[in-house]
Image (spheres, helix red, strand yellow):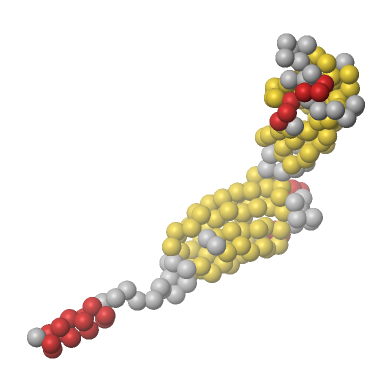
Amino acid sequence: MWLAAALVGCIVQTNDPGTPGAPGTIELSWTVGAAGCEAAGVADIEVQVGQQTQTFACAAGEATISAAPGRYDIDAIGLDADGAERYSGSTSVSVISDETSSAHVVLSALPAALRLTWFFENGRLCSANGVSDISATLFDDQDFLIDEQDVDCDAGELEFAELMPGTYAAVLVAHDGSGVPLFEGDATADLDKGDHLMVEVELFAH
């Protein structure tokens, strides 16, 4: 009986899953916009595969990455010479032990965002100025209306997102609880691809 038990123990130990297989290789290539890295102003490509992140020269056009066997989502970010994120793209690939898998990712321009905060010329806060809400209107450089937002004044900020690169003008109007305008201010901003810019707007008595 003891011998049989010992043999069973050996069998269980022998059939225990072994160590993970040897890593495989990803041959990753990329396309940046319609005209390539230089025209897009992209210097480097930051690639995330699983838990590893590596950076490659955009002009190289391709990179070799080692990864454990499995299925991966690949995220690629196009960085300008200052390290700012301007383009992005993603793809997926299956990695097989000791084999090479090919993947290609297309990167497109990232939208910009404009965050606005406000303060009053007299230095007082919203309630002390009798202000309940802020109405913000965003125009492009051709004076086309892009977006409108109404927020509680005490929120202190708002954001216009998913913007195309360009020059924008924002007009903020502060209202009392009845919708009467009490203060107004404006600001302009130049946005590039992927920018996340914050602008403070001073509100003057209407």
Q: Residue at x 75, y 55 (%)?
A: 83
The residue at the point 83 percent across, 34 percent down is 200
User: Is residue 105 shown left or right of residue 147?
Assistant: left
The answer to whether residue 150 of the structure is visible from this angle is yes
Of residue 186 and residue 43, the one placed in the foreground of this image is: 186
**Residue 43 sits in quarter:** bottom right
- Between 48 and 40, the residue placed more toward the observer is 48
Does residue 162 appear to the left or right of 141 in the view shown? left
* Residue drawn at point x = 78 percent, y = 33 percent: 117
Q: Of all residues shown, which one is farthest toward the front?
A: 128
**Image position, residue 123 (x, y; %):** 88, 30
Regarding residue 36, the answer to whether it shows in the image is no
User: In screen coordinates, is 153 left or right of 93?
Assistant: right
Quarter-wise, where is residue 128 in the image? top right
Residue 111: quarter of image: top right
Residue 204 image point, x, y percent: 89, 22
Residue 140 vs 99, above or below: the answer is above
| Position of 20 relative to 60 (above/below) | below
71 or 201: which is nearer to us?
A: 201
Residue 193: % across, % down: 74, 42
Specify the quadrant that holds the N terminus.
Answer: bottom left
- Extreme-left residue of the structure: 1
Residue at 26% across, 81% down: 14
Q: Taking 170 as reference, is 198 above or below it? A: below
Q: Specify whether 68 is left or right of 199.
A: left
The answer to which of 185 and 92 lies nearer the viewer is 185
Question: Residue 24, image x and y in percent?
Answer: 48, 70
